[in-house]
Image: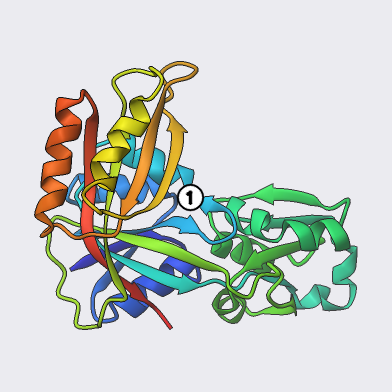
Amino acid sequence: MNIGYLGPVGTFSYQVAHRAFPEEQHTAYTTISECLDAVAANEIDVCLVPFENAIEGTVNVTLDYLYQNDVPPIQAEYILPISQNIMVNKQRSSDWQEATTVLSHPQGLAQCHDYLTKNFPHIKREAVSSTAFAAEYVSTHPDEKTLAIAPLFAAEHYDLDVVRANAQGNMHNETRFIALSNRKLAITDDPIETKTTLLLKLPDNDSGTLHTMLSTFAWRNINMSKIESRPTKTRLGQYFFHIDLDVGADNRLLDNAMVEISLLGGTVKVLGSYDVYKIK
C-alpha cells in the first residue's frame, strides 16, 4: 500500500505513518489538503492527517475539508504523544536566545504560545506548512537568527541542537491522526476504543432544533463524546456540527438514530466507524 502523510521527513505525521505502517510505501505531501486530495483521487491507498490536538483542539483544515469534499471513510485513528521542542542550527547554539524569528506549523506555534510569550515576547512567529519544514529551513540557513519548533526526530534528522525540550508545557499533549481509505486496514494491535464520527447540518436555526436532533442519541443510550460547531462558509450564522459517538457501525440503534435525524430534516455525513489505537 501507498501511505500518504503531511511531510517532509520528520513531521509528527511522518512518525505515525512509519510506526503504524512500517513496511508500506510512504509518500509525503506539502499540505493536509494535498494529501486528502490524493486519497480522494485514488492516487494513494491511505491518507494519514492530524485531526485533533489535546491543547489546541480540532485541526480545522482537516475538518473543513471533510465537510466540503467527498473522501474515503475513516478506517482507523492513531493517538500520538506530542512533544514540541525549540531547536536551532548548531552554528547558532551560543546565541540562540538572540533569535528574532521562530518557525513552525500553526499548531506548533499555538501549543508553545505560553513559553514564547514568557521567554521571547518580541520574537516574530512565522507559520509554515509543517514542523519538519521549519527544522529543515533552520538547518539550511545558519546565517539567520531563527528557531524552529519541531519533534525531536526532526532535530536528529536535520542535525539541530535542541535548546528547550517540551516547550508546549503540557506533558499530556497528544494528537489524533485519522487514516482515510477505501480499504479495510488489517491492524493486529488491540484498539483502546471504537467510535463513529459524523457531521450534522440542521434544517434551520429554529429554537430547539439541535436539542431535538441530539435527543435521538440520548434516549438510545448512545454516548456522545464530542460535539463542536463550525461555520459552513456559506453565510454568517450557518453552522455544521462535528460529533463523535462511542459506538461502532455494528450498533443497530445508531442506524435507527440516523434514520430519525433524516426524518427530522437533518443532513448527516458519516465520516466513518473505526477503532482507535495508541502509539507509544
Residue 178 x, y percent position in the rendering:
33, 60
Q: Residue furthest front?
A: 219
Q: Is residue 253 left or right of residue 134?
A: left
Q: Residue at x 12, y 64 (%)?
A: 184
Foreground residue among 220 and 111: 220
Is label 1 in a helix, a strand or a loop?
A: strand
Residue 261 vertical position relative to residue 23 in the rendered view, above or below = above
Q: Which residue is drawn at the image coordinates 49% and 17% (left, top)?
A: 236
Q: Amino acid at mark 1?
A: Thr
Compared to residue 180, the image places residue 67 above or below, namely: above
Residue at mark 1: 58
From this viewpoint, is residue 143 visible? yes
Residue under the point 20% across and 51% down: 73
Q: Position of residue 60 (x, y in %)?
A: 47, 43
Q: Residues within 10 Å of mark 1 (few under 14, many from 20)?
A: some
In-image side of 169 versus 180 (left or right): right
Q: Residue at x 41, y 70 (%)?
A: 79
Q: Quadrant of the C terminus?
A: bottom left
Image quadrant in which you'd find residue 199: top left
